[in-house]
Amino acid sequence: MVKINDPEHQLETAKDIFINAIGETMDLYGINRSVGNLYGTMLFEDSMTLDEMREELQMSKPSMSAGVKRLQEFDIVKQKFTRGSRKQHFVAEKDFFNFFGNFFPRKWRREIVINTEAVHKAIAIIDTLNDREGIDEAVKAEGNDIKQQLIDTLPYFEWLENISHAIETGEIYKHYPIPEQKYKY
């Protein structure tokens, strides 16, 4: 029986609070909460095998494998060579600035591609419609208004591309430096 005042239980509770927060915030960014919990759990370990992850999180091995692959897509979990072990070991990116630089630009690039392609396809439809003979002037005017609205979104995606590039190259830290570590316990 585990006592609430047991020091080991209290340490696990403290870790669980943070793991839950990581899972919740990653869910906000489109990563399944259980995958976020996996990442949070891995933050407190040097490395973990899929079996250790499964045991810790009580999830199936295929779910763990899929979650690790998802995290590897963003370079926030990497495979680690462990001499003498036949099992794959994985390690989580513990530096949140590196996490930020790996995770967000990739998410934003996807947003940029999806939306700019949609803008160009929609404009092509409107242009084709406007080129038709005998098109009603009210329809043509509405189409031009929609086209302008679409065009007005393009500077945002250009800006987002610039931000992504600045994060990936580290240029952003010239303008917004990483704060000095001032929290020590």
Image: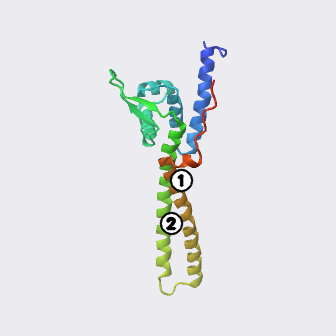
Q: Split into 4 quadrants, where in the image is the N terminus?
A: top right
Q: Earlier in the sequence, mark 1 or mark 2?
A: 2
Q: Residue at x 59, y 22 (%)?
A: 12
Residue 61 x %, y %: 42, 30
Q: Residues within 10 Å of mark 1 (few under 14, many from 20)?
A: some
User: What amino acid type is highlighted by mark number 1?
Assistant: Ile
**What kind of element bears circle 2?**
helix
Front one among 19 and 136: 19
Quadrant in which the C terminus appears: top right
Judging by the rendered image, the residue that carries numbered circle 2 is 119
Q: Residue at x 58, y 49 (%)?
A: 175
- The residue that disc 1 covers is 163
Q: Position of residue 95 (x, y in %)?
A: 52, 35
| Residue furthest to the top | 1
Residue 184 marker: none
Quarter of the image where one finds residue 3 = top right
Marks 1 and 2: which is nearer the front? 1
Q: Residues within 10 Å of mark 2 (few under 14, many from 20)?
A: some
Amino acid carrying label 2: it is: Val
Q: Is residue 135 above or below residue 64?
A: below
Alpha carbons under labels 1 and 2: distance apart? 20 Å
User: What residue is at 62 percent from the left and 25 percent from the top?
Assistant: 14
